[in-house]
Image: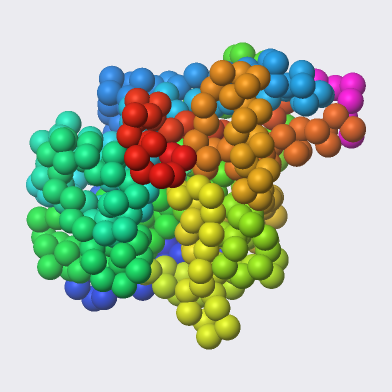
Amino acid sequence: MIRSENGYFGEFGGRYVPEILLPALTELENMFNELRDDPTFWQEYVSLCQEFSGRPTPLTPLRRLSQELGGAQIWLKREDLNHSGAHKVNNALGQGLLVKRMGKKRIIAETGAGQHGLATAIVAARMGLQATIYMGADDIERQYSNVFWMRQLGAEVVGVETGARTLKEALDEALRDWAATVETTHYVLGTACGPAPFPELVTYFQSVISQEMREQALKQIGRLPDEVVACVGGGSNALGAFSAFLDDKEVALVGVEAGGISFEKGEHSIRMLPDTAEPGIAQGYKTLFLQDEDGQLGDTHSIAAGLDYVGVSPILAHLSQTGRVIPESATDKEVTDAFSLLMKTEGIIPALESSHALAGGFKRAKSMRLINISSSTSAVVVIRIFLILLEPFLSRSGRSF
Ligand SMILES: *Cc1c(COP(=O)(O)O)cnc(C)c1O
């Protein structure tokens, strides 16, 4: 399991926030430290995921696709089969349990594409909490279907009109709300980023993914995979997929970032490869951030809204520096190719985010055939899939997901 040293992973992490938020973060950290080693708490969390979100999610063999690529056997961990269509609900459910224990009645979140907002609204409704979701005004227009469902679920969705009217402004607004309401309100951070203890806490809940994968691989394949490949936005699905394998040195852990259009500044969201991002402090923590010449947060691009982020989990920044996690990237073009190949050979419709893991995994699977043609090689690709139910709304939003 991943443990910080006072909130740090090597040089990354920490807690760089206005003083007014420190008591809430300390309260959260104390509660988390008390519960993380309590097997009854973990069992309560897993039971909730089973009852409410269909866990354990299957490990699906991709037989036709593996044959097409040759050599490596590829399996998918099907986080798309969670309630609301992605892994984000795992974390929201876990934090919901913490909120109940802290006796708070209100939760807030910020959301870009709307997936984390939707997961938070679902958990609020289920647990009888009040929810306010901050979202850039432009994102509200682009992601109207998710906004519609959040409101149907009883959440208040607040459009933020300042600045570029996207995720960054929504985040600032959510932090402002939290500073004013911290005694009654919990901030549900959606990925393994932000001030301590969030990176560790989100990873703890998402580690349910790899705990299941490890058991399923031993049972269904009869051995551990050679590689686990996951896409990296903030890093929560990747850390969820990696954490139970960290001590299995023979299992390579590969994080695929958004290669976008090109390696030019502003045309990708690669933070872990050399000569892309630099260490910096922003948004409450220290990590590798994409920056411009003046050290301001840089522009990013990805075909997948969930991977279009300037920072990366401090845990992944550290694990990539120590060499335990191998950074890879996939371009928009490679991603759309992988997306179609999976659909046509396996009848599974992936999210564009997850298609980065596919593209990265396919490249590696092909080279495994050359290196390792005789042994039975398996690669597990972590993938989640966009909620197919939302299809009727998609054509209106003008984006493909
Ligand atoms: C949100 C999202 C991501 C990116 O977030 P992480 O914290 O990096 O996991 C990746 N895939 C899907 C399907 C998502 O919805």
Residue 377 is at least partly visible in this image: no
Residue 188 is at least partly visible in this image: yes
Name which residue lies at 90% across and 32% down: 370
Q: Is residue 375 magenta?
A: yes
**Quadrant of residue 399 in the image?**
top left
Asked if 145 appears above or below 173 in the picture, the reply is above
Asked if 84 appears above or below 262 in the picture, the reply is above
Asked if 220 appears above or below 15 in the picture, the reply is above
**Quadrant of residue 23 in the image?**
bottom left
Rendering coords of residue 52 (x, y %): 28, 23
Q: Which residues are magenta?
A: 371-377
Drawn side of residue 85 relative to residue 278, left or right: left
Tell which of 295 and 393 is nearer to you. 393
The C terminus sits in image quarter: top left
Name which residue lies at 61% across and 70% down: 265
Name which residue lies at 17% across and 64% down: 177
Rendering coords of residue 114 (x, y %): 32, 46
Q: Is residue 192 magenta?
A: no
